[in-house]
Structures are given as structure tokens and as C-alpha cells.
């Protein structure tokens, strides 16, 4: 596994661990979590389906152009450029050691020249997961950003989906925590 991929996975794991330490989770069914998309990719997809979908959308993974060339546990795919109005999205896919199942999808999407619709981003999560608009655990703040996280259990969750929306940056992830830990 490349160093950059390891660093991204470790960073994601640390962020997930810190986020899971928060009390009063919004608890939802794992099936709902598995079907919430990150740029059209979900945990319910196979690694090949996810890879092919992102490549079809224009994402690139360096020299890796076909699924068969992906021979590591994790892969970073990039679309766009920081200087372009549409910005730059980087998605990390991690798969189980067996290679047949996605265990983590994370995205960092920077758009310095154009603002995100943070209300729409949080609203999409509320709609998908059936979260009340006034739930303080899934909210917008006065600075134009917002956060929302759901998990499949209040403690020791396996499935989780999280979103941090800022005016010029979106951070989101979908994970199977226990399987992600086992994939290291």
C-alpha cells in the first residue's frame, strides 16, 4: 500500500474514532447507511462497481485505469482542479482484505471559487436518514457550515456516515468501522 494511501486511511480512522466517541448518536439501520452515496458510490456497491462508476464520472487514479490494475487495499481517485470553478474532489476507496467488499469511502471536496449549498448537503442527509430538521446533532451553524453523522449503534458502531459541510469544502465518509480496522 502506498504511503499516501496509508496516511489517508490512518487519518480517516482517527477522525472516525474521534467522531464515534461523541455521545448521543443518531442511530439508523445499516442498510440505510450502506445506501447513502458519496459522489454516487455507496458501501452497498462492490469495489469494481464503485471504481467503474467514478472512472465513468471522470475521476482518475493516477496510472490505474482499469479495476484489474487496483492491487492494494486502498485507492485515491481525483476529479478536477483547485483553480477550476467546480473545484477538486478526492475520493478514497478502501476494500476488505478479501477485496470483495468496500469498507470505507471518504471524500474531500474543495471548491474555493464557488460556494457549496451546505443547506442542501445537510438536507440530503436529513431526507435519506429521516432526521428532523431541528435535530441538533444534524445541523447548520451561523457561519454557513454544518455537520451530521449517523451510526448503526449508539456505542461500538460498525456502520457510520458523516458529513462536514463548509462553504468551500465538503468532507464526507461512509464506513464499516470494524472491517476497516481489520483491513490494516
Image (cartoon, grey):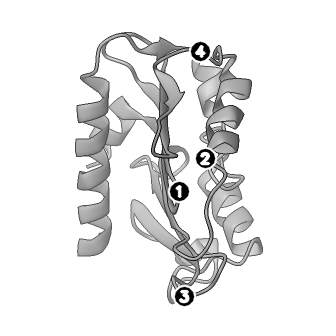
Instruction: Look at the numbered discs 1 and 2 and tell me whether their residues touch, using CB distance below 8 Å.
Output: yes
Q: Comparing marks 3 and 4, which lies closer to the viewer?
A: 4
Q: Is residue 59 above or below residue 19?
A: below
Give me the disc on residue 167. 1
Looking at this view, name the residue that lies furthest to the front.
Answer: 142
Query: Residue 184 at x, y = what percent?
Result: 25, 49
Instruction: Give the spatial CA distance, label 1 vs label 2.
Output: 7 Å
Q: Is residue 110 above or below residue 177?
A: below
Query: Residue 142 at x, y = what percent?
Result: 47, 38
Instruction: Give the spatial CA distance, label 3 vs label 4.
Output: 36 Å
Q: Earlier in the sequence, mark 1 or mark 4?
A: 4
Give me the disc on residue 134. 4
Mark 1 closeness class: few <14, some 14–19, many ≥20 residues within 10 Å:
some
Query: Residue 180 at x, y = what percent?
Result: 35, 41
SS state under label 3: loop
Instruction: Give the spatial CA distance, label 1 vs label 4.
Output: 21 Å
**Residue 35 is at least partly visible in this image:** no
Instruction: Give the spatial CA distance, label 2 vs label 3.
Output: 21 Å
Q: Earlier in the sequence, mark 4 or mark 2?
A: 2
Q: Comparing marks 3 and 1, which lies closer to the viewer?
A: 1
Query: Which residue is drawn at the image coordinates 28% and 39% (left, top)?
Result: 181
Give me the disc on residue 159. none
Instruction: Give the spatial CA distance, label 4 vs label 2.
Output: 16 Å
Tell me the residue that label 2 is attached to.
118
| Total count of labels | 4
Instruction: Look at the numbered discs 4 and 2 and tell me whether their residues touch, using CB distance below 8 Å.
Output: no
Instruction: Give the spatial CA distance, label 3 vs label 1.
Output: 16 Å
Query: Residue 5 at x, y = what percent?
Result: 32, 67
SS state under label 4: loop
Tell me the residue that label 3 is attached to.
83
Amino acid at each position: 500500500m502506498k504511503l499516501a494511501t496509508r496516511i489517508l486511511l490512518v487519518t480517516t480512522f482517527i477522525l472516525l474514532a474521534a467522531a464515534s466517541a461523541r455521545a448521543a448518536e443518531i442511530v439508523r439501520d445499516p442498510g440505510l447507511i450502506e445506501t447513502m452515496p458519496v459522489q454516487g458510490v455507496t458501501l452497498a456497491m462492490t469495489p469494481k462497481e464503485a471504481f467503474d462508476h467514478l472512472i465513468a464520472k471522470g475521476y482518475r487514479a493516477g496510472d490505474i485505469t482499469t479495476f484489474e490494475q487496483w492491487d492494494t487495499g486502498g485507492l485515491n481517485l481525483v476529479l478536477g482542479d483547485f483553480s477550476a470553478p467546480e473545484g477538486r474532489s478526492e475520493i478514497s476507496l478502501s476494500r476488505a482484505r478479501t477485496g470483495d467488499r468496500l469498507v470505507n469511502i471518504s471524500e474531500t471536496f474543495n471548491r474555493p471559487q464557488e460556494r457549496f449549498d451546505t443547506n442542501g448537503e445537510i438536507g440530503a442527509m436529513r431526507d435519506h436518514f429521516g432526521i428532523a430538521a431541528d435535530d441538533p446533532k444534524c445541523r447548520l451553524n451561523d457561519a454557513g457550515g454544518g455537520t451530521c453523522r449517523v451510526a448503526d449503534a449508539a456505542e461500538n458502531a460498525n456502520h457510520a456516515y458523516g458529513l462536514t459541510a463548509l462553504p468551500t469544502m465538503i468532507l464526507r465518509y461512509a464506513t464499516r468501522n470494524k472491517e476497516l480496522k481489520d483491513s490494516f
